[in-house]
Amino acid sequence: EGVSTLVLDKAGTWRVAAPWIDGAPGNGAGDLFSALFLGRYLETRDPARAAGLAVAATHAVLADAAARGLAEIDPVATAQAISAPPRLFEVERLG
Protein backbone atom coordinates (compact mmCIF):
# COMPACT_ATOMS: atom_id res chain seq x y z
CA GLU A 1 0.00 0.00 0.00
CA GLY A 2 1.36 3.39 -0.87
CA VAL A 3 0.88 6.81 -2.34
CA SER A 4 1.78 7.76 -5.90
CA THR A 5 2.53 11.17 -7.32
CA LEU A 6 2.14 11.79 -11.05
CA VAL A 7 3.96 14.49 -12.98
CA LEU A 8 3.01 15.38 -16.54
CA ASP A 9 4.60 17.85 -18.91
CA LYS A 10 5.30 18.14 -22.64
CA ALA A 11 8.26 15.77 -22.33
CA GLY A 12 6.40 12.92 -20.66
CA THR A 13 4.70 11.42 -17.63
CA TRP A 14 6.38 10.13 -14.47
CA ARG A 15 5.24 8.42 -11.29
CA VAL A 16 6.89 8.44 -7.88
CA ALA A 17 5.54 5.85 -5.44
CA ALA A 18 6.23 5.92 -1.72
CA PRO A 19 5.00 3.64 1.06
CA TRP A 20 2.07 4.67 3.20
CA ILE A 21 2.99 5.82 6.72
CA ASP A 22 0.50 4.73 9.36
CA GLY A 23 -0.18 7.44 11.90
CA ALA A 24 1.21 10.26 9.79
CA PRO A 25 -0.67 13.54 10.07
CA GLY A 26 -2.42 14.65 6.91
CA ASN A 27 -2.67 18.35 7.61
CA GLY A 28 0.01 20.32 5.82
CA ALA A 29 1.43 17.47 3.77
CA GLY A 30 0.04 18.78 0.48
CA ASP A 31 1.23 22.31 1.15
CA LEU A 32 4.67 21.02 2.10
CA PHE A 33 4.89 18.87 -1.04
CA SER A 34 3.79 21.76 -3.25
CA ALA A 35 6.38 24.12 -1.79
CA LEU A 36 9.14 21.52 -2.05
CA PHE A 37 8.22 20.60 -5.60
CA LEU A 38 8.23 24.23 -6.71
CA GLY A 39 11.55 24.91 -5.01
CA ARG A 40 13.20 21.83 -6.53
CA TYR A 41 11.71 22.55 -9.94
CA LEU A 42 13.06 26.10 -9.92
CA GLU A 43 16.44 24.69 -8.88
CA THR A 44 16.63 21.86 -11.45
CA ARG A 45 14.09 22.72 -14.17
CA ASP A 46 13.46 18.96 -14.26
CA PRO A 47 9.90 18.06 -13.18
CA ALA A 48 10.66 14.36 -12.67
CA ARG A 49 13.69 15.05 -10.46
CA ALA A 50 11.79 17.76 -8.58
CA ALA A 51 8.92 15.34 -7.88
CA GLY A 52 11.28 12.62 -6.70
CA LEU A 53 13.03 14.96 -4.28
CA ALA A 54 9.76 16.49 -3.06
CA VAL A 55 8.21 13.07 -2.43
CA ALA A 56 11.32 11.90 -0.57
CA ALA A 57 11.44 14.99 1.64
CA THR A 58 7.70 14.95 2.34
CA HIS A 59 7.90 11.26 3.21
CA ALA A 60 10.75 11.95 5.66
CA VAL A 61 8.80 14.73 7.38
CA LEU A 62 5.69 12.55 7.65
CA ALA A 63 7.68 9.57 8.93
CA ASP A 64 9.26 11.75 11.60
CA ALA A 65 5.88 13.10 12.71
CA ALA A 66 4.40 9.60 12.87
CA ALA A 67 7.37 8.23 14.82
CA ARG A 68 7.07 11.06 17.34
CA GLY A 69 3.26 10.75 17.57
CA LEU A 70 2.72 14.32 16.40
CA ALA A 71 -0.67 15.58 15.25
CA GLU A 72 1.01 17.99 12.82
CA ILE A 73 4.12 17.89 10.68
CA ASP A 74 7.25 19.59 12.02
CA PRO A 75 9.31 20.73 9.02
CA VAL A 76 11.62 22.81 11.21
CA ALA A 77 12.77 19.76 13.18
CA THR A 78 13.31 17.84 9.94
CA ALA A 79 15.06 20.59 7.95
CA GLN A 80 18.06 18.33 7.27
CA ALA A 81 15.81 15.64 5.78
CA ILE A 82 14.12 18.27 3.64
CA SER A 83 17.39 19.49 2.16
CA ALA A 84 18.91 16.01 1.82
CA PRO A 85 16.21 13.31 2.03
CA PRO A 86 17.54 10.12 3.66
CA ARG A 87 15.60 7.85 1.28
CA LEU A 88 14.91 8.44 -2.39
CA PHE A 89 12.16 6.68 -4.33
CA GLU A 90 12.23 5.51 -7.93
CA VAL A 91 10.97 8.00 -10.50
CA GLU A 92 9.29 5.79 -13.10
CA ARG A 93 8.72 7.11 -16.61
CA LEU A 94 5.25 6.13 -17.81
CA GLY A 95 5.26 7.77 -21.18
Image (cartoon, helix red, strand yellow):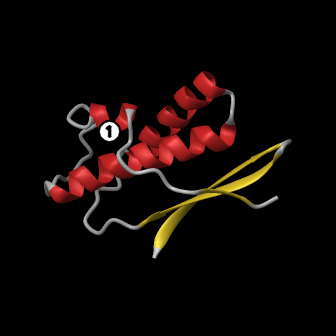
Q: Residue at x 50, y 65 (%)?
A: 3
Q: Say which element carries label 1.
A: helix
Q: Residue at x 66, y 44 (%)?
A: 48
Q: In this rendering, would 46 be left or right of 81?
A: right
| Residue 16 vertical placement versus 81 (above, below) | below
Quarter of the image where the N terminus is located: bottom left
| Residue 17 vertical placement versus 58 (above, below) | below
**In front here: 25 or 2?**
2
Q: Position of residue 65 (x, y in %)?
A: 22, 51
Q: Position of residue 73 (x, y in %)?
A: 27, 45
Q: Residue furthest top?
A: 43
Q: In this rendering, would 38 be left or right of 78?
A: right
Q: Residue furthest right?
A: 10
Quarter of the image where the C terminus is located: bottom right
Amino acid carrying label 1: it is: Ala
Q: Position of residue 61 (x, y in %)?
A: 31, 46
Q: Position of residue 76 (x, y in %)?
A: 24, 31
Q: Residue at x 25, y 37 (%)?
A: 78
Q: Residue at x 62, y 30 (%)?
A: 41
Q: Residue furthest left?
A: 68
Q: In this rendering, would 43 be left or right of 1?
A: right
Q: How many marks?
A: 1
| Residue 95 vertical placement versus 80 (above, below) | below
**In front here: 91 or 19?**
91
Q: Which residue is mark 1?
A: 81
Mark 1 packing: few (<14 Cα in 10 Å), some, or many (20+)?
some
